Image (cartoon, rainbow, N blue to C red):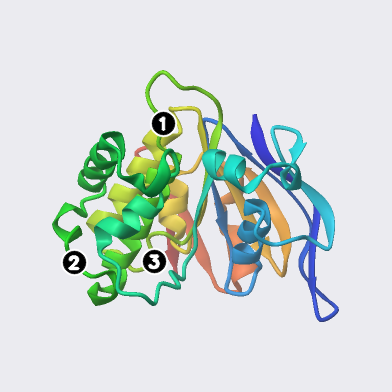
Amino acid sequence: MSLSAHGLVVSRRGKNIIDSVDISIEVGKLSAVIGPNGAGKSTLLSALAGDLTPSKGIVTIDDRPIEKFSPATLAKIRSVMYQSNNIVFDFLVEEILVMGWIRDAFGRSPLATKTVTELAEVCEVTNLLGRSFLTLSGGEKQRVQFCRALVQLWRPSGEHGPRYLLLDEPTSSLDVSYELGVLKILKDLTGNETGVLVVLHDLNLASYFSDNIYLMDEGRVVASGETQEVIRSDTLSGVYETPISVEEREGKLHVYTH
């Protein structure tokens, strides 16, 4: 079970932003996409989410083309968190979270209220529920949008089937404790029939938490595989064009720049 892309090409003004990419997000694993600025990471995530139509290639969910899914069905099995929030109206945080609820109209059922309350506690945004979203800091907005993505994918314990969560740099504005908290939540989520793909800027976070890593450069995946196969001094130094060292201590890889 996977959300996959095969031979994916995204072109803009005659240039391939994504160039012949193959990638697979497997249920039960956390996959990370890393690479320098402009490598095509965010564009790839948009195409995988079905929000951007590729110029060539195909995106599938469990071997079915993503365009064959209705918007309602797609919303139940994949959730997306982008970097930009694009919210201009003065909604309360609680209202933003309820927007992620897709199981009944307007999210006003007792189950919706209970789920939003519980996930707000998990994501440590309970104290923000009564606040206007527009008054929040960048990090607070990021935590709220992360919680909304989890609300969308929530399901009762007796319901089964694969789900996929795609996130574009969900920790970029967060303090260290919140960074670790988000990645731990994502790691735990993979144990519940969920595949996670996260675009990360921090190479150490990618190495600590990922099962698989895709390293992108100029629209292509230039290295992929398990963490130890990709987080290598020679590979990273070449792509990022700066000396990078990788050391293993206590079973974890640590990345340093010079």
Disc 2 residue crowd, few under 14, some 14–19, many 20+, Cα 10 Å: some
Outermost residue to the front: 105
Q: Amino acid at mark 2?
A: Arg
- Write the residue at 71% across / 56% down: 221
- Picture residue at 37% right of the left edge, 47% below the top: 183
> Tag 3's secondary structure?
loop
Cα separation, mark 1 vs mark 3, equals: 28 Å
Q: How far, Cα to Cα, is label 2 from label 3?
A: 22 Å
The answer to whether residue 191 is seen in the rendering is yes
For marks 1 and 2 on the same chain, the one whose residue lies earlier in the sequence: 2
Quadrant of the rendered structure where residue 40 is? bottom right
Q: In the picture, residue 61 is in which quadrant?
A: top right
Identify the residue under disc 1. Answer: 155
Q: Is residue 249 visible?
A: no
Crowd tier of the residue under label 3, counting other residues whose Cα lies within 10 Å: few below 14, some 14–19, many 20 or above: some
> Is residue 66 shown left or right of residue 166?
right
Place of residue 217 in the rendered image (x, y in percent of width and height, measured from the top left): 68, 66
For the view shown, which residue lies furthest in the top direction?
158
Question: Disc number at residue 234?
Answer: none
**Residue at which label 2 appears:** 131
Disc on res. 172: 3
221 w.r.t. 27: above or below: below
Q: Which tag, 1 or 3, sits closer to the chain's start?
A: 1
Q: Residues within 10 Å of mark 1 (few under 14, many from 20)?
A: some
Q: Is residue 237 left or right of residue 22?
A: left
* Residue 77 picture location, percent across and down: 55, 38
